[in-house]
Structures are given as structure tokens and as C-alpha cells.
Amino acid sequence: MLCDMRTKPFQVPSQELVTADGVGVRISLGGGYSISDPLAFITSSSDAFGALYLELRHALHATVGELACEAIIGGRTSLTDRIEELVIPRATQLGVKLTQLQVWEAVPLGRLQT
């Protein structure tokens, strides 16, 4: 079976999430991925990219919940570093490598009323 090893783009559309300090934020991610292990890519899942996408969404939710709004809005690098830390083990199992990950949008929505 042939595998296209070229880098492919992806996007995680805007997600409205709550930070550790109770501020709503809207965040979207983008980047690229490539197949690093063709055998794992074909055999680990019937939809390896779909599984990677779900991992990215889960990691985004978890990471935003760990950080204060200021850390997310002011220092976007730590957000992507933490997401990569959470996603890379599963990506490796899927035979996929993240070649790029960046925050496309990070907008505070305001403090939630409790």
C-alpha cells in the first residue's frame, strides 16, 4: 500500500473553552503533520488522522483548563508546547509526526459568572 509522506495541513476550528482562572476564551489551532511510520499509520487505526484530530482537541481542552487566561493570551508558545507534550505519544503510536503546531486565534471572551 502506498502512503503519501508529504506534510499535510490541518485545522482545529475555534473552540470556546474555560481557563483555569474562569475566563472564557476562543482558541483555534492549525499546523501540519506527516506520516512517520507507514505501517503504524495503516494498522493502528482505521482513521489515523481522525484519531490525531481528536487527540489535538482533547489536549487543547486539557491545556486551556490548566492555564490562566493571561498565560494563554500573552504567551502562546507554552500552550502549543503543552499540547505537543500531550499529543506526541499518541501521534507516535498512530505513525504520525506533528511538523508544525500554532495558535491561529486566541481571544478572551470574559469572566464567567458563578
Image: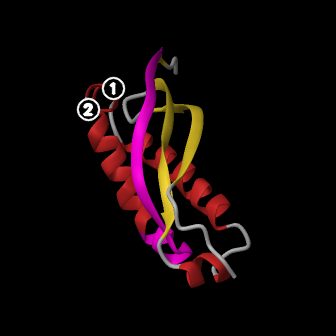
- Magenta region's main secondary structure? strand
Residue 5 location in percent, x, y? Answer: 53, 67
Judge whether residue 103 is colored magenta. Answer: yes
* Residue type (three-letter) at the residue carrying disc 2: Gly
Asked if residue 38 lies left or right of residue 103, the reply is right
Asked if residue 95 lies left or right of residue 100, the reply is right
Q: Quadrant of residue 73?
A: top left
Between residue 24 and residue 55, name the one nearer to us: 55
Q: Residues within 10 Å of mark 2 (few under 14, many from 20)?
A: few
Residue matched to label 1: 73
Q: Is residue 32 above or below residue 109?
A: below
Name the residue at 58% across, 33% down: 15
Asked if residue 105 lies left or right of residue 58, the reply is left
Between the C-alphas of marks 2 and 1, the distance is 6 Å
Q: In this view, does 107 lie above or below 4?
A: above
The quarter in which the N terminus is drawn is: bottom right
Residue matched to label 2: 75
Label 1 secondary element: helix
Q: Residues within 10 Å of mark 1 (few under 14, many from 20)?
A: some
Between residue 29 and residue 59, name the one nearer to us: 29
Residue 48 location in percent, x, y? Answer: 64, 67
Q: Bounds of the magenta span? A: 89-110
Between residue 79 and residue 114, name the one nearer to us: 79
Name the residue at 66% across, 83% down: 43
* Residue type (three-letter) at the residue carrying disc 1: Ile
Label 2 secondary element: loop
